[in-house]
Amino acid sequence: MNRWKLFVPLALFALFLGLAMYQLSQPKDERIESAMIGKPLPQFALPPAVAGVDGVSSTDFGDGKPRLLNIWASWCLPCIAEAPQLDALENAGAEIVGIAIRDKPEDVAAFLERHGNPYARIGSDDLSEVQLSIGSSGVPETFVIDGDGIIRYQHIGDIRERDVPILLEQLRLAE
């Protein structure tokens, strides 16, 4: 009987274990590159998410002025956490356009009443079609859109205090 055949499974297991150990020892790359950076916003027109605030259209972004496009939802806890930073961005002169994802008008109104409204416009994306078409996979996410409607920067997750200067700088670079 060939004794070496008994060692083949052990050798394969050792090879697998060595490969797994190598992969675990490599530094983790947490940077996510968006495929939409440098590309124009897709065409869309969203109805208002709440009474008294205009809806959003892709044509709103082609007037020469850079803006922030914030993807959010009233049911999103990190969106509550970023509300003070959105106010700080607005107070610093940033125009912020919002897209509410899978939300009800009454819930959007309650959120804005509770946490403030930094938005110049808020569109309602009930099926997340616009969200997905611009490369967003979750809420909140914020994009810097230049005055020609080109996506220049993507911030994934809630905006923290340390992110405010970065977003303001990205807006300045998008001019």
Image: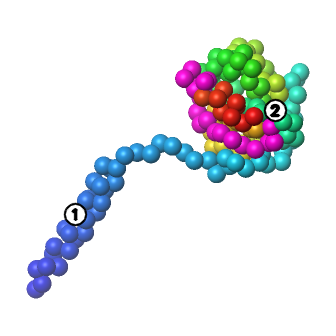
> What residue did someone put label 1 on?
14
Q: Position of residue 13 (x, y in %)?
A: 24, 64
Question: Where on the picture, by quarter, is residue 65?
Answer: top right
Is residue 39 visible in the rendered structure shown here?
Answer: yes
Foreground pick, 141 / 93: 93
Q: Which label sits on residue 44?
A: none
Q: Position of residue 132 (x, y in %)?
A: 70, 47
Q: Residue at x 13, y 79 (%)?
A: 4
Q: Return the disc, 2 or 1, that comes first in the chain's sequence.
A: 1
Query: Which mark's residue is nearer the viewer, 2 or 1?
Result: 2
Q: Is residue 70 above or below residue 151?
A: above
Badge 2 marks a residue whose secondary structure is loop
Is residue 128 found inside the magenta-colored segment of the image? no
Residue at 83% x, 28% y: name it: 121
Question: Label 1 neighbourhood size at 10 Å, few (<14), some (14-19), many (20+)?
Answer: few
Q: Single out the residue that lies furthest toward the bottom.
A: 1
Q: Residue at x 78, y 20 (%)?
A: 109
User: Relative to 52, is 28 above or below?
Assistant: below
CA gap between label 2 and label 1 equals 59 Å
Task: Choose between 106 and 123: the one closer to the eye.
Answer: 123
* Residue 156 vertical position relative to residue 108 in the rendered view, above or below: below
The amino acid type of the residue labelled 2 equals Lys
Q: Position of residue 133 (x, y in %)?
A: 73, 48
Callout 1 amino acid: Ala
According to the image, label 2 marks what residue? Answer: 65
Residue 73 horizontal/vertical position (percent): 69, 30
**Residues in magenta?**
147-165
